[in-house]
Image: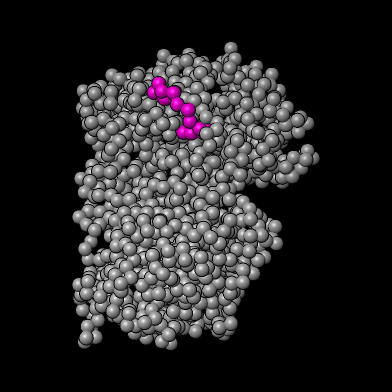
Amino acid sequence: MTTTPEKTDLVSVTIDGIQVSVPKDTLVIRAAEQVGVQVPRFCDHPLLAPVGACRQCLVDVPDAGNGRGFPKPQASCTLPVAEGMVVNTQATSEVADKAQQGIMEFLLINHPLDCPVCDKGGECPLQNQAMSNGRGESRFHGLKRTYPKPINISAQVLLDRERCVLCARCTRFSEQIAGDPFIALIERGALQQVGIYEREPFDSYFSGNTIQICPVGALTSADYRFRSRPFDLVSTPSVAEHDACGAAIRVDHRRGKVMRRLAGNDPEVNEEWITDKDRFAFHYATEADRLAYPQVRDEDGSLRPASWPEAFAVAARGLQAAGASAVLTGGRVTAEDAYAYSKFARVALGTNDIDFRARPHSAEEAAFLASEVVLRSTVTYADLESASTVLLAGLEPEDEAATIFLRLRKASSPGRPGGGTRVVSIAPYASRGLAKMHGHLVRTAPGAEAAALDAMVEHAEHGIDKRSVILVGERLATVPGALTAAAGLSARTGARLAWVPRRAGDRGAVETGCLPNLLPGGRPVTDPAARVDAATAWGVDRLPEAPGRDADAIVAALASGELRGLVVSGVDPDDTSDPAATRAAIEAASFVVALELRETEVTRAADVVFPVAPVVDKAGMFVTWEGRPRTFEAVFSSPTSLPDLRILAGIAEELDTPLGFRTVAEARAQMEDMGPWDGERAGLDGSPRSSAATRPATGDFALATWKLLVDNGSMQDGDKAYRATGRAPVARLSRAAYDAHGPTVTLTGDRGSVTLPAEVADLDDDVVWVPANSFGNGVLADLASPGSRVTVTKGADQ
Amino acid sequence: MTDTLTPVLTDNWGDDRAWTLAAYAARGGYRALDKAFAMAPDAVIEEVKESGLRGRGGAGFPTGMKWGFIPQDNPKPKYLVVNADESEPGTCKDIPLMMASPHTLVEGVIISSYAIRANKAFIYIRGEVLHVVRRVQRAVAEAYAAGHLGTDIHGSGFDLDVVVHAGAGAYICGEETALLEGLEGRRGQPRLRPPFPAVAGLYASPTVINNVESIASVPSIIEHGHGWFGSMGTEKSKGFGIFSLSGHVQRPGQYEAPLGITLRTLIDLAGGVREGHELKFWTPGGSSTPLLTAEHLDVPLDFEGVGAAGSMLGTRALQIFDDTTCVVRATLRWTEFYKHESCGKCTPCREGTWWLVQTLSALEKGQGSEADLDLLLDQCDNILGRSFCALADGAVSPIQSSIQYFRDEYLAHLSNGGCPFDPAAATLFAPEGATA
């Protein structure tokens, strides 16, 4: 596979009398782990540069490998092994043991004895190692250092300074890993403390990781502080549902309630880091508007509670009566649920009118997904580290795929052997994230990405070759020709290509055929053999032959009456290309079945509403942007809602077109039995390049936009402290445009206008950037249609 | 015998306006520069190696060898950094030298930079001594104006720029890697080694860091030759050095003498201990070196001799304490200094000094028991050699050595219910009749 360390340059050392061979440059503290000895430590962290600050890991080194020993105990976290080195840890050396006990005693003299009320108590490295490597009784009877407590270093992260052992893990993480050095050690001596600059809070999407790696209870989150004790929690491993990165997480829960989420340790994916969104945004599943029972539209026009069997029957009857129906799933579904939607559309509704893309999209994109994405997994996280160059197009990793961002930041760090990976971004301006990836900007106005990609092969300086990786974001769908150009660039240069969507379910939906042109397993709808293959697997006579409508076409067909029924799940009209049209289509549909987590305007308009289980209540699988399957188990079993696939199975059974599964396990087994298509895949050649003809040409400024990591998304509801860590919405303009219109600007597009504070960035003079979902109902609802232009005027003083 | 003074660095201190370029030049200043430029840089390094000059900042590392560690095939620029952060309690040699004869230092900087092929040199002066900063700045400006600095110095083709940098007031910045951090604009905290500064020092480039006195000794070595230098001092501690006498002596000040001179000779030269009193204890090289007593009066003050006596030559900061001084009180004051100056990076120093002060102040007040002395020694044992840099090693030196020599005096505090000394008697303005 990809990350097996090479077993070259082994060095042989003797630790506590046991000989062990470890790779050259291994630190003694980790070599000791190989012989089963845990040397106590605080500042040491395998993913951070060694610092040697806490001195807890002192060991005795009677022979440094050259026949001479060190006269004093050495910090094993900063000492690399040498051939023939002899190390005695606390297990065999009284000197090392006494040295460690001495350090532990020093750490404790200024540490409060508040373990009974401290969040860390029970899972605290200081507590644990004080027991294993400290003396039983304190000899200190003096005055401890105290501070007023706690202080907010951000809206979410709190600091109790007297608990801090000054290991600098948090500050080093922020500087080295996240690239957000907004916390630092200040003052000196025993009054040294972690601090922020008074006008610069700890502004980082990754701040929660500092809480997790803090070896004491000095850092806590506003969300979890004083909520629970570690020994009351049950931990379940899971996968983050907020993006397509598949970060491993650990869900800690108590009595049926999630108390907190932590980063899991998966070296191949997220290493030990997750975003604050993955960590803190889980309250959406317990908001007051969570649906708890099925509802059907009563004769008086209101929604009333219904039993599951009644709702299944009403939904089935309604869809049957409506005739032509379509399916819109949104991008949050698990692969099994997506498979169920895909099969339901084809088998129960007899249509290919299904699309998971609840966002601006194009026919070109559907063709690209069928040709270049489905069934392919050519790029992994490890490949990002070994690539010579990673070209980004229509993708802002820090906001849209933050695990990729952290990998690229690591891969591109200047200290890496061989100079590291070069990051090149086709983007409207050099974002803070790009700077943190040491990246190079190819400044490109929105809409010009295709030309920029085409030009890339000519640019020897950018060095796109077969050792390169091209990552394209879902936003490129809105740029005619861009995805085709990316595929072309890959074909011409040999660079590997990967598509990075924003949502956790997107890639799984592609693989399972939630698209008008694809059946599950990458079977092209237009390929008769593929259709026969799928029909055989499903035990049906035939499958619909004509490629279906995409989401925009479904909306149009509902409005025009060509389609009358709709099964809709996890779609927020404000995310779609035309929110007003989507609302009108739902209104116009004669029968709407909504599968939702919480009450929304869609459920209020639906004829039957089914409460679906959030990921915490069901097992499932997400497929990462790499094509890596990430399965997870249910944390809870809640009787109030069901997985989407169980609901669809219930409706299908009422329609006499059973899907052949009722549980996640059955659906997954059927999916695996069906397997991937081994026939010819659809080509991209001759596919329609979407046209820009319909776009309004008025307005002076091209509008660049994407969604920030922390924004108004409904899955981030329920934690005010978390949301307060989001970046305040601003409009970014070139210096010239700012001078002409700033510091407050009003943007006016074909759907409305918005007034925001302005900031200068290195944009073209006729481009303006705003966050896509950080104000009002978002850009698509409140400002402008995709790819359109806007006017910028001086904003009224607020 | 090595019992006479050998004024070299201090020779011109009494001159009229000795700090001016004119006065320095009148004595033949900047002559050694031309001699050095006539030599190959490696020959200059060799000459300094041969002389046996050892670092005058305390550790005594051979200066020429340090210069030889600079990898000349490294494409990065090389830097010379002069450590003028003289902060060790009792040490007062670099500051008087820079006040009296800054050009000696500047000439040394030029020759040393030439030897290691550095085109940029920094003089890092502790920020508290603003008058010294100004004087060195002025000397550097004079040297630029006279063509001793800048481009193509003396027609040699050698370019050198000198930056005088004022520190922000931290003892730790005398530690060379903390000094580099400070010079780069960061908090003064020591760096992890390796890499050593010779390989990756200032701005990750090869860097030599030398004490003021070491660098100031270089012009005389070049001018008079290594044989002349080596003729002074002892076998392994060659040359001369400034011995700073302070405290209870009649004439405190800087006495420049060959290494290996004894304190007995120096005290004689200084007019003896305070009238009517006896020497009780003294520090050979500032408060970070274990203190010695009257029994060590004839220890040769070179690196080996003081080491054999259980202490360190250090910076030759001879603080003299007579019999009016309470050793517990003196030790507590020093310990408070180290607590205040601990940078906070590592646990034993940060927390250990915090605790030591509390234990010592209780003892000084006569609180506690004899067991607390053992506790104190055990704390010292847990600090010494366990910390990130040598600051904490220095912090425990006065405690360990004072208990070694004056355990009874500590116990007297306990039996007396407090300090048995009159603190006023130890002051230099002690009233007549004050007694120990």
In depth, the one of A763 and B221 nearer the eye is: A763
Residue B2 falls in image quadrant: top right
Residue name at image x 62 percent, y 37 percent:
B206
On screen, residue B70 above or below A199: above
On screen, residue A162 above or below A516: above
In depth, the one of A272 and A337 nearer the eye is: A337
Q: Is residue A79 magenta?
A: no
In depth, the one of B334 and B324 nearer the eye is: B334
Residue name at image x 40 percent, y 54 percent:
A630
Can residue A5 be seen in the rendering of this structure? Answer: yes
Indicate the quadrant containing the C terminus of chain A: top left, top right, bottom left or bottom right: bottom left
Residue A107 falls in image quadrant: top left
Q: How many marks?
A: 0
Residue A524 drawn at (x, y percent): 51, 67
Can residue B285 be seen in the rendering of this structure? Answer: no
On screen, residue A122 above or below A439: above
On screen, residue A366 above or below B323: below
Residue A261 drawn at (x, y percent): 32, 54
Residue lying at the far top of the rendered structure? B1
Q: Is residue B145 left or right of residue B414?
A: right
Residue B92 drawn at (x, y percent): 51, 32
Q: Find the magenta span and give its range.
A: A15-27
Residue name at image x 52 percent, y 25 percent:
A83
Residue name at image x 37 percent, y 58 percent:
A670
Q: Is residue A22 magenta?
A: yes
Residue A492 falls in image quadrant: bottom right
Q: Is residue A769 left or right of residue A226?
A: right
Residue lying at the far front of the rendered structure? A541
Residue lying at the far right of the rendered structure? B155
